[in-house]
């Protein structure tokens, strides 16, 4: 299986469907999504990850009657390193070492609980996120395409795209 660097990361077409997740590892976080939900990612300097999460929390809370979306905020900053925040519908903000969302998430909660380990290496966490999303995509009819990963550390963002025919398989067809 190869992990492709993406030259067209920011040019991907937006369509519908969902399977998203973020997980902390020793030194950063890995974020991932199937291609039916992503259009790109940005990493700015400053503000702290927690500040960004709290901005989304306020938006979700203030618009809780009309906004029907849970949000995952993940990133790295000098104060706290890699962080993952989950902001469910209604606007609560919770830091968690791993978080999943979207329609594919209902199929993988048990897998995440059984396989996430604190202080994984970058590559262990990358494979964990990849396998989790591949399993969600195999079970959820609204998820599919390629897996896009962002590995965020103090050095910046490393982007990877894993093509559909290169995804891990959990059963033979």
Image: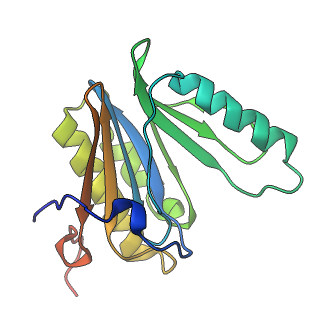
Q: Measured along the vertical axis of the image, is residue 106 above or below residue 17?
A: above
**Does residue 70 appear left or right of residue 159 in this picture?**
right
Residue plotted at (31% across, 65% down): 8
Quarter of the image where one finds residue 95: top right
Q: Nearer the viewer, residue 145 or 8?
A: 8
Residue plotted at (89% across, 53% down): 65
Where does the C terminus fall, quadrant-wise?
Answer: bottom left
In the rendered image, residue 52, in percent from the top left (x then y), is placed at 60, 30
Q: Measured along the vertical axis of the image, is residue 164 above or below residue 3?
A: below
In the rendered image, residue 82, in percent from the top left (x then y), is placed at 38, 26
Residue plotted at (32% across, 53% down): 149
Quarter of the image where one finds residue 12: bottom left
Identify the colour scheme used: rainbow
Q: Measured along the vertical axis of the image, is residue 17 above or below residue 150?
A: below
Q: Nearer the viewer, residue 151 or 91?
A: 151
Where does the N terminus fall, quadrant-wise?
Answer: bottom left
**Residue at the far top in the pictured view:** 79
Q: Is residue 160 visible?
A: yes
Q: Is residue 117 visible?
A: no
**Does residue 104 appear left or right of residue 58 in this picture?**
left
Q: Measured along the vertical axis of the image, is residue 37 above or below residue 164?
A: above
In the rendered image, residue 77, in percent from the top left (x then y), is placed at 42, 21
In the rendered image, residue 151, in percent from the top left (x then y), is placed at 29, 41
Q: Nearer the viewer, residue 91 or 154?
A: 154
**Residue at the far bottom in the pictured view:** 173
**Residue at the far right in the pictured view:** 65
């Amino acid at each position: 299986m190869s992990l492709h660097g993406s030259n067209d990361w920011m040019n991907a077409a937006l369509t519908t469907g969902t399977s998203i997740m973020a997980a902390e590892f020793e030194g950063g976080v890995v974020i991932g999504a199937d291609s039916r939900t992503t259009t790109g990612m940005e990493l700015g300097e400053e503000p702290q990850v927690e500040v960004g999460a709290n901005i989304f929390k306020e938006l979700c809370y203030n618009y809780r009657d009309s906004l029907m979306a849970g949000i995952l905020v993940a990133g790295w900053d000098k104060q706290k390193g890699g962080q993952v925040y989950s902001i469910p519908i209604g606007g609560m903000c919770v830091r968690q070492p791993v978080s999943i969302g979207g329609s594919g998430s209902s199929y993988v909660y048990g897998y995440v609980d059984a396989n996430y380990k604190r202080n994984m290496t970058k590559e262990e966490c990358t494979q964990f996120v990849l396998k989790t999303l591949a399993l969600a995509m195999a079970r959820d009819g609204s998820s599919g395409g390629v897996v896009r990963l962002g590995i965020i550390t103090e050095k910046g963002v490393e982007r990877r795209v894993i093509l559909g025919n290169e995804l891990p398989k959990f059963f033979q067809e």
